[in-house]
Amino acid sequence: PSYYQTSIFIGVETVPYTSPLKPALEIVREILGGYFGTNLIQTLRDKGGFIYDWACFTDNFTESGYIIFNVAVAHENVYKVIPIILAEFNRLAKGDISNEEIEMSKGHLTGSIDANVEKGLDYVDWYGMQELLNPRNVLSVQEQIDIYKKVGKQEIIAASSKFLNKDKILI
């Protein structure tokens, strides 16, 4: 095997910071690759041993946003990994999402928020981004967590179907 690696970014454009779809898409991001237990990470890392590292992230700005799944793979595994990732985007776009995936993802997302505002810089970032991008609706951590808890399965499926379909994916 080669010690050289390729970094692959696969993503989709999503919504602005103030969009009501943003919370559902953040849950979709968690389902896609936000933690060790997701289907995609289990397949790529634990079953396949294909990836060295991964990140799944989202960002939202005043006019648009994105979800990106990024992996580091050995050169010889690039053409094995891309179809697996695209298949997972497709699975989610078709709405094949279990209640367990949703609950795990919500739990991870809300736990991450709680953990990430314990440090001063993260706390400032939490409120600063809101003040910058949505000053009329600055939410406390608990208010944001309550929003995530209320997002229903149908909202998550609708967001996945709208944004993760194959004609919108960029590699």
Image: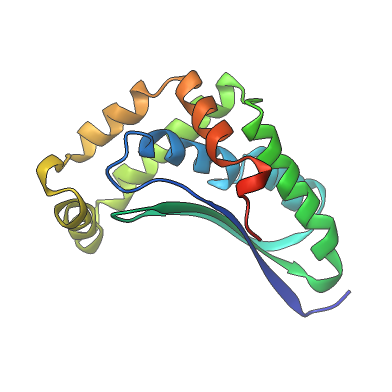
Residues 113 and 78: in front is: 78
Q: Does 19 appear above or below 57?
A: above
Tell me which colouring the rendered structure shows: rainbow
Q: Quadrant of residue 49?
A: bottom right
Q: Quadrant of residue 79?
A: bottom right
Give left or right: position of 32 versus 119. right
Give left or right: position of 106 versus 6. left
Confirm whether residue 46 shows in the render.
Answer: no
Residues 6 and 44: in front is: 6
Q: How far from the left and from the top, in percent, is residue 128? A: 17, 58
The quarter in which the N terminus is drawn is bottom right
Q: Quadrant of residue 43?
A: top right
Q: Total marks drawn?
A: 0
Confirm whether residue 138 shows in the render.
Answer: yes
Outermost residue on the front side: it is 167
Q: How far from the left and from the top, in percent, is residue 19? A: 32, 39
Q: How far from the left and from the top, in percent, is residue 113? A: 33, 44
Question: Residue visible at 49% across and 32% down?
Answer: 159
Q: Does 124 appear above or below 39?
A: below
Question: Residue visible at 62% across and 57% down?
Answer: 170
Question: Residue visible at 73% across and 61% down?
Answer: 51
Q: How far from the left and from the top, in percent, is residue 66? A: 47, 53
Residues 91 and 122: in front is: 91
Q: Does 94 appear above or below 31?
A: above
The quarter in which the C terminus is drawn is bottom right
Question: Residue visible at 31% across and 52% down?
Answer: 116
Give left or right: position of 150 versus 6. left
